[in-house]
Image (tube, helix red, strand yellow):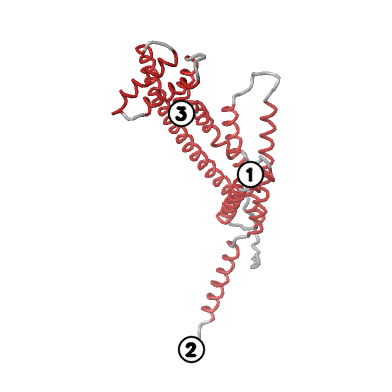
Amino acid sequence: MTVPISANLHHDVTVGDRVTTAALHKISWGSIFAGVAVALAVQFLLNLLGVGIGAAVLDPATSDNPDAGTFSIAGGIWFVIAGLISSFIGGYIASRLSGRPSNSTGGYHGLTTWAVTTLVVLYLLTTSVGSLIGGAFSGLSSIVGGVGQTAATAVTAAAPAVANATNPMAGIEQQIRTSTGNDPEALQNAAVAAVQAVVTGDEATAEEARVRAADAVAKAQNIPVDQARAQVDTHEKTYRENVAAAKQKAVEAAQVTTAALSAGAILGFIALVFGAIASWFGGVTGTKRSGVVVTDRNV
């Protein structure tokens, strides 16, 4: 069977176009790694610049300095800006060095550069290797730090209350020992133990415990039993209030911490998405325009 010459020519041209197209859209890992190196270097330099500017704003000789929350927010904003700039430059470099004339291929080179850069930065931040580069990439934590400052403040404020919840008898014991003056330590210990039995004991035996506590306090302070019973009632009320307040503080601190972590994660997500977009546009911008297409199957 004889095949027409025109059909053979058409087949050859079609295969040749496919090979050429595949070569033009093939990924160039060399250019991507070059883009990653440039992106990391630019981000490193910009973060150092941010640290320098932040340190220059502080004046240890005066108290008129921005608060920690302001610095955290400013650090997060600076890191986002530095990430956008470095992502765009890294994507541009990768696309330009790849020599691909297609906008979409250049954009994908830029996006891949951003992905590799992000993984490298996360690796540096989560391993001991990060200590070798100091705090140049610590701006990532500043994204969360702005809102995290609020959570830290809340937890600090709640710490005494939580401590009282762990040992609500601490303040009451001190008050009992102080009010007993120079009485024998054995009487003090008995009074403390009796009051502790009242506030931590079973409700069924609570009244009996109150009577014993009143007797112990009366002997320790050398006061009438009725007056000692009033003190026992006061200590019991104070104990209940301390526990309730501590629980409320702990709940509030947990709520603030959860909200801060949620906001920080969302801000980090947004920053990374914008970085990906910047790298894509960097790759598109870096697309090499040429009237002559050279196919290199080894790229």
Please state the horizontal and vertical placement of residue 103, each as a whole percent of the image. Answer: 57, 54
Q: Residue at x 68, y 30 (%)?
A: 53
64 above or below 203?
Answer: above
SS for callout 2: loop
CB of mark 1 within 8 Å of CB of mark 2?
Answer: no
Q: Which residue is mark 1?
A: 86
SS for callout 3: loop
Q: Which residue is mark 3?
A: 167
Q: Which residue is mark 2?
A: 1
Which amino acid, by three-letter code, is at mark 1?
Ser
Q: Nearer the viewer, residue 34 or 231?
A: 231
CB of mark 2 within 8 Å of CB of mark 3?
Answer: no
Could you give the CA–CA distance between mark 1 and mark 2, rounded to whole angstroms? Answer: 62 Å
Please state the horizontal and vertical placement of residue 151, each as a whole percent of the image. Answer: 50, 31
Which amino acid, by three-letter code, is at mark 2?
Met
Q: Earlier in the sequence, mark 2 or mark 3?
A: 2
